[in-house]
Amino acid sequence: MLVEVVAIVGSHSFADLHKIKVCCKDFLDAAEDSYVWRRVSLNMFPLIQWLPNDKASWFLNRCKECENVESIYREGLRKYFISPNGKIDGLDMLKVAAQKNHKEAKYMCGMILLCSKDDELRKQGLEHMRFLRKSKCVVSCRNKVKQLLIGFIWRNNSILVRNLSPLCNFKSTCKGWKVKTSSWILVDDDDDDDDINLCEHCRWDHELEFSYKLFNGH
């Protein structure tokens, strides 16, 4: 039970995990459990360590060794967007993190798969996005991905290629999501209406536009 408590603390804040470790030996021992390392938050660390130090490198390597889900997600991002030949490996790693219900990984998998020309892969992408919409976190996931990538010029590589075939094939006649909201700007997940009478495909076509802009897709 103590390991679970420490893991919950660590999953919210690395700084709080450090504080709890110095409280007593029992907390320190619990913090060394691999279960804690798999869940510890990496929010304090940038996606790329431009000026790594020994302590930070050791910590991040330990997270990687323990298959920390956030570490898997970040490694997937780096491989997919940075490595010239890493798209397949990067997407595979993002899928692993998504299967572990890492929400930003689900968002990235959803967007990447919805860009595919393969109908089956697009269906997989829809499942990821439906999960996030049901969890009311599409907008927050998008914002977290954007925040993590801010300042990285490599995102200009136009690696997220635009699919010219929209998900909705009835743009001129369907009663799309835009009809009810009268605006395509979502600033909060509470605004993301899941009314079944509205066109779901229009919703995801709109989300793809955000991603194309974010990753400078074409």
Image (cartoon, grey):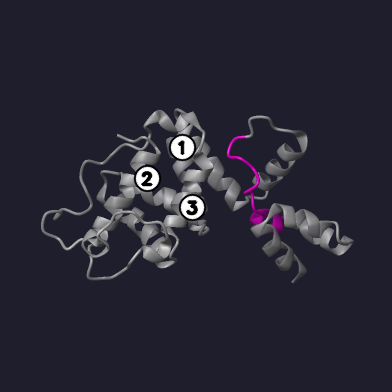
Marker disc for residue 80? 1
Q: CB atoms at circles 2 and 1 under 8 Å apart?
A: yes
Residue at position x 86%, y 64% in the image: 26
Q: Is residue 167 left or right of residue 33?
A: left
Q: Nearer the viewer, residue 65 or 176?
A: 176
Quarter of the figure with residue 28 = bottom right
Q: Mark 2 points at which residue?
A: 112
Dot 1 amino acid type: Tyr
In terms of sequence position, does the residue under pointer 2 or pointer 1 come before the other?
1
| Direction front: furthest residue | 182
| Direction right: furthest residue | 25
Kindly report the distance in space between the C-alpha atoms of the residues bearing marks 1 and 3.
14 Å
Q: Mark 3 points at which residue?
A: 104
The secondary structure that most of the magenta stretch takes on is loop
Magenta residues, start to end: 34-48
Element under label 3? Answer: helix
**Whole-percent x and y of residue 123?**
30, 56
Q: Which of 98 and 176 is in front in this view?
A: 176
Dot 2 amino acid type: Ile
The answer to whether residue 120 of the structure is visible from this angle is no
Kindly report the distance in space between the C-alpha atoms of the residues bearing marks 3 and 2.
12 Å
